[in-house]
Image (cartoon, rainbow, N blue to C red):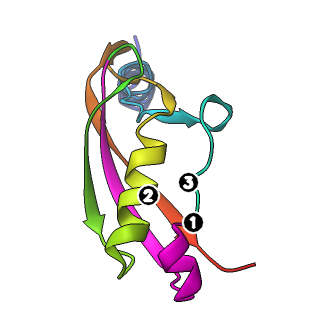
Amino acid sequence: MKSPLSTLLCSLLFVAASSAMAADTAPVMDNKSCDPPKYPKAALMNEETGTVSMGFLISTDGKVVDSKVEKSSGSKSLDKAAVTALALCKFRAGTKDGKPEQTWTKVDFVWKLE
């Protein structure tokens, strides 16, 4: 006869294993698949800097389907340049229950003067 403790431990292990197998994963950008954004001339001349936070909707084949600026860098030209360039990147699709699924992911890009 099993003790209540061993039954509980077996149940917890089963739940933990099931959760690990069914875990959702977020899309991941392949940094080598695209060129980094280029500094817009006007923003460079005005010494504009900042971080733009973007959302990208990634399809099951890793392509960007939609994009949006979630938090501006403070410069529309920097925001547009980052979204335009990074939307060309290839991603590894996110998964749900182990299957590729179209899902949103967040990407931050920092503009700084060198």
User: Magenta region: which residues?
Assistant: 40-59
Spot the residue most to the bottom. Answer: 46
Question: Could you say where residue 69 lies in the image, as x and y percent from the top left?
Answer: 27, 60
Is residue 94 one of those drawn in magenta?
Answer: no
Name the residue at 53% across, 36% down.
29
Q: Quadrant of residue 65?
A: top left
Q: Is residue 51 above or below residue 93?
A: below
**Foreground residue among 68 and 44:** 44
3 left or right, relative to 57:
right
Q: What is the CA distance from the residue labelled 1 to the residue labelled 2?
A: 7 Å
**Foreground residue among 32 and 39:** 39
Q: Quadrant of residue 53?
A: bottom left
Which badge, 3 or 2, comes first in the chain's sequence? 3
Badge 3 amino acid: Pro
Question: Could you say where residue 11 lies in the image, as x and y percent from the top left?
Answer: 35, 23
Question: Could you say where residue 99 lies in the image, as x and y percent from the top left?
Answer: 34, 11
Q: Quadrant of the N terminus?
A: top left
Pointers 1 and 2 in contact (C-beta within 8 Å)? yes
Badge 1 amino acid: Tyr
- Circle 1: is it few (<14), some (14-19), or many (20+) Cα within 10 Å? some
Residue underneath mark 2: 81
Residue underneath mark 1: 39
Q: Secondary structure at mark 1?
A: loop
Q: Quadrant of the C terminus?
A: bottom right
Mark identifier at residue 37? 3
Badge 2 amino acid: Ala
Pointers 3 and 1 in contact (C-beta within 8 Å)? yes
Q: Secondary structure at mark 3?
A: loop
Q: Is residue 13 above or below residue 51?
A: above
- Circle 2: is it few (<14), some (14-19), or many (20+) Cα within 10 Å? some
**Foreground residue among 6 and 91:** 91
Spot the residue most to the right. Answer: 114
